[in-house]
Image: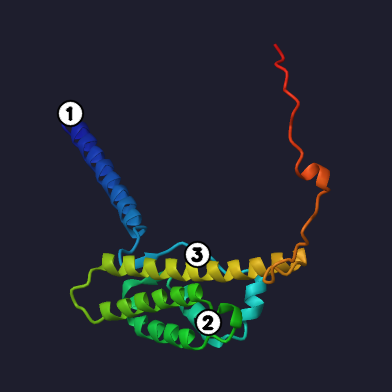
Amino acid sequence: MKYIIPFLLIILLTGFSCNKNKDTQEVTEISDSLKLDVNHIENRIGETLIPEAKVELDNWKEYQLVDELLLKYYSISTLEALSNADELSRLVKMMKDSIKIEKLKKPNIIARINVLENETLRLADMATIPSITKDEVKAEVGYIVAIYSAFNAKINTIYKSESIQNMLEVDTEVPIDLQQTTTSPPYLYRERTKLIKNPN
């Protein structure tokens, strides 16, 4: 009897310690499942079009296709980004060739589209290179998203300035013809002869 009680106590302590290890293992497995996938690329949503610009660009089908595909690039895996790269570069090329809105046929808009096209072509080339790392793909997708955001920001600027110009009801394209004001001759050549007194 003397030996049975310590023996049972040891068995109980061992049983409790084994159960504690199982609980710890379950917690570590749960926390491991919450880790982010290293193959997944997350980007912050950039500039979107203002309502005035959206209305104008609704009929520009090529822009709408690029916009729809680029929305996927804000949260995409590296494999998907590389596999969609050819389609993206093709759509950007079509968008560049199909600018129908006269307001957008400006050098600064065309330059942004050219830069966007170059970066999408670079991503398409990366898809053919087997030694490309995930970090390089992630950086390139970040560049593309940033350039597209800058492109949208420039479009917004054009439409905001147009709406401000319309609100002011002043045509700023044509210089305002100011009539020369004439001052009366006595004040034109009048000299100052009065001395300023020192307040001290």
Distance from label 1 to label 2 (Cα)?
87 Å
User: Where is mark 2, residue-wise?
Assistant: 63
How dense is the environment of label 3, judged by Cα within 10 Å: few (below 14), some, or many (20 and up)?
Answer: some
User: Where is mark 3, residue-wise?
Assistant: 46
| Residue drawn at the location 35% of the way across and 85% of the way down | 86
| Residue drawn at the location 21% of the way across and 78% of the way down | 129
- Residue 127 falls in image quadrant: bottom left
Distance from label 3 to label 1 (Cα)?
76 Å
Q: Amino acid at mark 2?
A: Tyr
| Residue drawn at the location 58% of the way across and 85% of the way down | 60
Instruction: Tell me which numbered mark, 3 or 2, is placed earlier along the sequence.
Output: 3
- CB of mark 1 within 8 Å of CB of mark 2? no
Residue 107 x, y percent position in the rendering:
49, 76
Which is closer to the viewer, label 3 or label 1? 3
**Residue furthest left in the image:** 3
**Residue furthest top in the image:** 200
Picture layout, residue 57 above or below residue 177: below
69 vs 25, nearest the viewer? 69
Label 3 residue SS: loop
User: Where is mark 1, residue-wise?
Assistant: 2
How dense is the environment of label 2, judged by Cα within 10 Å: few (below 14), some, or many (20 and up)?
Answer: some
- Residue 156 falls in image quadrant: bottom right
Residue 45 x, y percent position in the rendering:
49, 64
Quadrant where the N terminus is found in the figure: top left
72 vs 56, nearest the viewer? 56
Task: Report whether residue 44 is seen.
Answer: yes
Task: Report whether residue 74 is seen.
Answer: no
| Residue drawn at the location 54% of the way across and 82% of the way down | 64
Label 1 residue SS: loop
Q: Amino acid at mark 3?
A: Gly
Q: Amino acid at mark 1?
A: Lys
